[in-house]
Image (cartoon, helix red, strand yellow):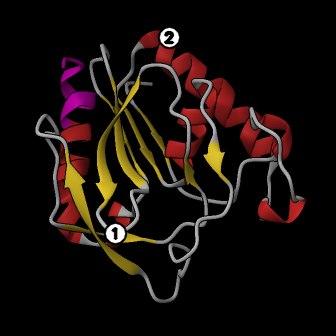
Amino acid sequence: MQGFLLTGGSDISQEFLRQPVPDARFIEDPDPARDAWEFDAVAKALKQQLPLLTICRGIQVLNVALGGTLYLDIPNHDSAKNVNVQELRYVDEAQIQFPKVNSSHHQALAQLGAGLVVEAWCAEDDVIEQVRLVDYPFGLGVQYHPERDPLYQPLFQAFIDQVKTGSP
């Protein structure tokens, strides 16, 4: 394996979260078998410092794997049929930036896991939409869905370039 891409999907199962879950209804369609595989694979990818791109659920798995927590229910971000277009605020150091992103998720990062820094927030409600791993060759996580529009091709190209070269 030369790189690792984690995609969107169902919510992380309660037993993998590092926080109390006040209402089990916040966890939608959990898949413990997928969780077990992904958490193990993330640990191996991080140990090998493989290029890493995580999308939606993927950013949440990465965050939890690094000791972080989630907001279990984010209002106004979960309309899969009517995707919300969000304007983002970026830190100056963010190498990958888009004027607006599509956003459809009902959970989001709360407390950041070890080694993650925020690169972008939703301008409207401060929901974290993009993070990167510090002191890591290429580790990027996005809450939005770049697979849904060719506009986001530079994000995938940056990941592919890292996979091909194996260098930062």
Q: Which of the marked residues, 1 or 2, is nearer the chain's N terminus?
A: 2
Residue 92 location in percent, x, y? 11, 39
Q: Is residue 125 left or right of residue 32?
A: left
Residue 101 location in percent, x, y? 28, 68
Quarter-wise, where is residue 23 in the image? bottom right
Q: Which residues are drawn in magenta?
A: 161-168
What is the magenta segment's predominant secondary structure? helix
Q: Quadrant of the C terminus?
A: top left
User: According to the image, label 2 marks what residue?
Assistant: 47
**Numbered mark located on residue 124 in the image:** 1
Q: Amino acid at mark 2?
A: Lys
| Front-most of residues 44 and 93 | 93
Label 2: how many Cα within 10 Å (few below 14, some 14–19, many 20+): few
Q: Is residue 152 left or right of residue 33?
A: left
* 27 w.r.t. 51: above or below: below
142 within the magenta span: no
Q: How far apart, in angstroms, are the residues tagged by discs 1 and 2?
A: 36 Å
Task: Please name which of the two marks, 1 or 2, marks the residue nearer to the observer.
Answer: 1
